[in-house]
Image (cartoon, rainbow, N blue to C red):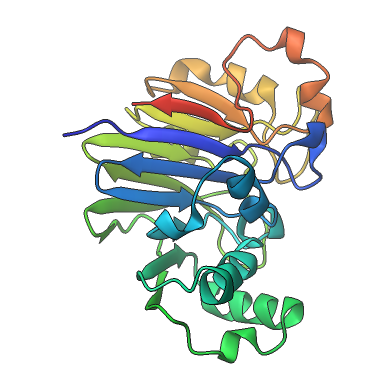
Amino acid sequence: MGSVEICFIGSGDAFGSGGRFQTCIAIRSPDDFLLVDCGASSLIAMRGQGIDPGEVTKILITHLHGDHFGGLPFLLLDAQFATKRTAPLTIAGPPGLEERLTQTREVLFPGSSKVKPTFDLELVEIKPRTPITLDGVTVTAFPAAHFSGAPSYSLRVEVEGKTFVYSGDTQWTDTLIEASEGADLFACECYVFDKEVPLHNSYANIVEHLSELTCKRLILTHMSDDMLSRASEIEHETAEDGKTVVL
């Protein structure tokens, strides 16, 4: 088994707090390169960090909010017209992904969803607590406490004997303990410091439940200005754009 590299291409929230790009996390193994979420700014972030979007074989989506899946129309347009991609691409996400993606593509680039792609594009629906395997990558979705007009998930990704978990956007829920059990790396959204904000997690909640987490490493991400302004008070590891971790 080879090493697995996790790169936080985008670690920001929906509002670009701190000048950060929206959520996009890359997983690179010796034989694969996939993304977990693809926020609206992801193609820009990838270009800026010297990452070739043509290398991506799979994109796993936690939920259907623009800062987590809104980059797909741009990435697909780039693949079709700029780079003329020929390699197949799989996009997996919650129920409603295909309809919402088609609607978004048509709003942003009318007619784009009707153009026959130069590559095989497969859309896969992920059901909660039902592991699926995509070319050796096993993905399990766990329900997240976050409204997005469709199911929202935390995703557990197993590749090359390593396990990476991303909470997605969610209020604290004990499902996070289950989803991240024994994970090599758990990237957990930490939107605010100690406020109670609907649909999102806080640093105070994470600290309160820290003893219940069994992950080997925890990195906090998706931070708002509230979190960033109190960086000196944070005692745990945090993400930033371009941060890379080897598992």
Residue 175 located left or right of residue 102: left
- The residue that appears at 60% across and 74% down in the rendered structure is 101
Residue 188 located left or right of residue 122: right
Q: Nearer the viewer, residue 144 or 138?
A: 138
| Residue 199 location (% of width, % of height) | 71, 46
Quarter of the figure that contains the C terminus: top left
Residue 13 located left or right of residue 161: right
Quarter of the figure with residue 173? top right
- The residue that appears at 36% across and 41% down in the rendered structure is 28
- The residue that appears at 68% across and 59% down in the rendered structure is 65
Q: Residue furthest front?
A: 83
Judge whether residue 174 can be spotted in this image: no
Vertically, is 247 above or below 134? above
Quarter of the figure that contains the N terminus: top left
Q: How many numbered discs?
A: 0
Q: Nearer the viewer, residue 142 or 104?
A: 104
Q: Nearer the viewer, residue 108 or 170?
A: 108
